[in-house]
Image (tube, rainbow, N blue to C red):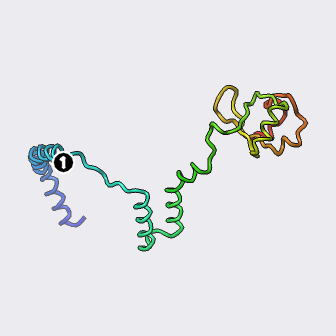
Amino acid sequence: MCPHECLCAAIGAKAVPLVKIIQFLLFILAKPVSVALDMALGAEMGTTYSKGQITELLRMQVKAAIITEMQETVMSGALKLKEEVCNIMTPMEKVVCVTSDAELDFATLSKIFQCGYSRIPVLAPGGRDIIGMLYVVRLLVSQYLCVPCRGCGCQDWIV
C-alpha cells in the first residue's frame, strides 16, 4: 500500500460514524416520503410483456447480434409449446390404459387392439400413477392370455 492509500483508508474509517448519522437523518426524511408516494401512486407494477412482444424482443436481439438465430428459435418455440402440446397430447380422460393387475383376457386385448395406439400406459393398481408402458406390438406375438399383466412375464414389455 502506498502512503496515499493508507491516508484515505484512515480518513474513511474515521468518517464511518458520521456517514451512519447522515444515513439515519436522511432515513427520517425519506421514509415518510416513500410511504406517501406508495399510497398515492400504488404499488410498483413490473414490466410485463405478451408472447408477441417477447418474440419481437428476441428478433431485435438477433439483429443486434446479442443472441444467435438458433437461440431465438429455441426461445420462440418454448413460448409456443403450451399451444402445441394442447393440440398434440391426448387428455387423460380419453387415454386407453390398463392397470398392472388387469387380466389380459380377450376383452382387454380387444380393447387394446381396437384403440389403435402402439403404447398403452400401465397404471398402479387402483391409482392414477403410471408405472410403465405396454407395447402393443409385443402383445401381438404373445402367448399370454387371462393372466395378470404384472405376472405374465412381460416385464420387458413394460418400460
Left or right? Give the position of 158 relative to 69. right
| Residue at far front of view | 114
At x 53%, y 61%, the residue is 74
Judge by depth and name the residue closer to the eye, 7 or 73. Answer: 73
At x 57%, y 53%, the residue is 84
Residue 57 percent location from the top left of the image: 40, 65
Judge by depth and name the residue closer to the eye, 12 or 95. Answer: 95
Residue 76 percent location from the top left of the image: 50, 61
- Total residue callouts: 1
Q: Is residue 17 above or below residue 145?
A: below
Q: Pointer 1: residues within 10 angstroms few (<14), some, or many (20+)?
A: few
Q: Quadrant of the N terminus?
A: bottom left
Q: Quadrant of the C terminus?
A: top right
Query: What kind of residue is marked 1?
Result: Leu
Q: Is residue 128 above or below residue 55?
A: above
Left or right? Give the position of 147 relative to 32. right
| Residue at far top of view | 126
Element at badge 1?
helix
Residue 130 percent location from the top left of the image: 67, 36
Residue 132 percent location from the top left of the image: 71, 38
Find residue 3 and report its image quarter: bottom left
At x 40%, y 61%, the residue is 53
Give the residue pinned by disc 1.
41
Left or right? Give the position of 60 relative to 83. left
